[in-house]
Every structure is written in structure tokens, then in C-alpha cells.
Amino acid sequence: MTMMKAAVFVSPGRIELQEKRIPDVGPNDALVRVTTTTICGTDVHILKGEYPVAPGLTIGHEPVGVIEKLGANVKGYTEGQRVIAGAICPSFTSYACQDGYPSQDGGCECHGYKPMGGWRFGNTIDGTQAEYVLVPDAQANLAPVPDGLTDEQVLMCPDIMSTGFAGAEAANIRIGDIVAIFAQGPIGLCATAGAKLRGASLIIGVDGIGERLTIARQMGADVTINFREVDPVAEILKITGGRGVDASIEALGLQSTFEAALRVLKPGGTLSSLGVYSSDLKIPLDAFNAGLGDKKIVSSLCPGGKERMRRLMNVVASGRVDLSALVTHHYPLDEIVEAYDLFSHQRDGVLKVAIKPF
């Protein structure tokens, strides 16, 4: 067999299932037969033309699968082994990687630095919404799936879980902190779980969908606020006695949620921004205290690499986090266009869709 099915970006508003050649395996690569993947909000930005990628590119960046073939230089793995690879699959040879920022892997700096260069699947190389995916720098990026864990249990690890946890880590949450998390989609829910693991004593989850707020409480939120019913900024300031929260996490990518996350911060607090924005952000002068409020604004892209994936799967295996509630729908790869329509229009209570190529 030389051909496979793959979801290909054609033009803004159009992703198609097409036949493509199964990739050849280089010495540092691994060919993985994809058993489960999913659709991310970033993929929807690509579909809408809000984030540019090359026409003809296979989309997707969250692979769970089985090693089909290993490159000659890849050691310590076996064909037939169940693995995941992070959405961020850095080379670990760039300045950015060696400076501690693998998601910003610039690749070959002699050809110019590329921000977010560690994000290759479905961005700069063919991605995971296909029957097979070629994992580059496989020695650094393949992580064996522990026995007893299902595809669905580890499906969030390559991106959503890593991103949400990165938001909590970047917020520098300390034991006893009060944290507000704006938007309880898949990333916000993982940020909620991450804030609980970091030791927050009061976690406030904000969303406009009641079902998501219910899941937020399962993930660790102590208080949930429906922004369609009350002003979340006023409510959070009331809860904190006017003091504000120690950290806020923005997990949607809108001006309104960014501003709200900034307005609830205490002096010296940290706003951890995870949303993918599709237009310029403006920082309101009063909320920023004219730049004199000792507030911090940080952004994060999920770390990658096999060690990050190992740690996340350990958290799942330990039972400290159960993300199974996030997988709300299942589709075969043959119906991925319909899956995109469901996910992009957020119908039927969808959170994450498990896509099965075989």
C-alpha cells in the first residue's frame, strides 16, 4: 500500500478528505499509523483562513497511534508499539529549544527564526488527521503509551492538556492562590485541572454554557459563573472582597475575555494568556493601571517532547486527572468534513471529537 486518506486544507472554508502518498521514512523519523486523533480550535482558525497554512497541507496535530516503521537512527522503540507525539515536536537543536522554549523551536536559524517553529504538525509539515503521520526527530518526540490507558484517555496529552497545564504553570500559581479561568472549553477545562494540581485554594470558572460549567466543577472549579447571567468581573471582585485574584487564565482568544481577565487581577497578579487571537489586542489603560500596577501578562504555547508527554500520561495514569468527559463525539476519518462542521459550529454540546482513521 502506497496511498492513504488525509484531511487536506484546500482554501479558507474548505478542508477535504483526499488521497496522499504514505510518507517515506528518513533516518531520524518514525511512521506512525494513527489510531485516534482529534480536531483543535487552532484547526478551525486554519479552516477559516485566520491562521495561514499552505494549500495541500494535511491538518491536525494530536496523534495517538502505533509505530509502523522506524528510521535507522531511532533507538529504544519497536515497531508495533503504541505511542503519542506532542503537537509540538521540536528538534531540540535550536537556540530556542536549548534556551528552554521547545515550542518556539526556530529550526535552522541560518534561514531565519520562525516563531512557534516547534509546532510542525499541520502547520509546516503534514499533520495527523490522516491514516499515517511522519514524526520528525522521533527519538525526541515519541512517547510510549503506558499499558492500560486507552486512546481516549491520552488523546488530550499532545496538545489540550499540555496547553492548559502550561497556562497554569505560566500563571505561577502558588498553594492557596485564588485563580479565575475565563472560558471552559477543552483548554480552559485543562487549565482548571492544572490550577487544582498546582494548589489553588479557590478556582473560579467562567463560561456561558451550563454544561461546560458542570464539567468545570468536575475538573476542580470551586465556583462557576455564567457570564450570560451576571457580570463576571463584578462577581469575582465581590467574591474576593475587592482584592482581586492572584492569577487569571484567558483560554478563548477574545478581546472581551482578555480584558475581563485583566480587570480581576490583584496588584502584582499574573494574567496567563492561552487563547489564539485573530485580531489585534488592546490593553485598556485603567485595567493596566497605566503600566504601573505590577501586573504580569504572559503567553504560552504548549511544551512538547517525549518527557513532557511522559509526565502528562503519568498524571492520567495516576487518576489525579480524568479528562474522559472532554471526548464528547466520535467520527471515522471518512466523515471528518462533517466532524469539522459540528466542531466549528459548536453544536450538540461538543467539546472534543475523537477521529478514528481505521
Image: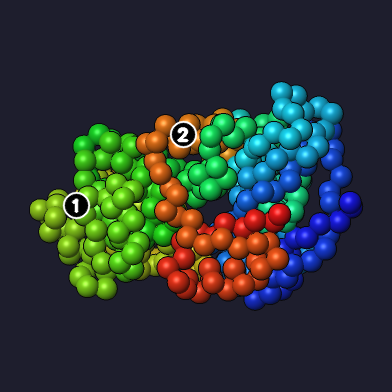
The residue indicated by pointer 2 is 317
Rendered location of residue 80, percent (x, y): 74, 35
Give whichever of 328, 314 is nearer the camera: 328
Residue type, numbered disc 1? Gly
Rendered location of residue 311, percent (x, y): 50, 31
Rendered location of residue 196, percent (x, y): 31, 41
Residue type, numbered disc 2? Ala
The residue indicated by pointer 1 is 244
Q: Eyeballing the image, is 136 above or below 8? A: above
33 on left or right of 255: right
Q: What residue appears at the point 30 percent right and 60 percent down from the top-left corner? A: 213
Q: Quadrant of residue 94?
A: top right
Q: Quadrant of the C terminus?
A: bottom right
Q: What residue appears at the point 47 percent right and 60 percent down from the top-left corner? A: 328
Rendered location of residue 2, percent (x, y): 89, 52
User: In the rendered structure, which disc, 2 or 1, sits on the residue that comes first in sequence?
Assistant: 1
Q: What residue appears at the point 81 percent right and 27 percent down from the top-left corner? A: 73
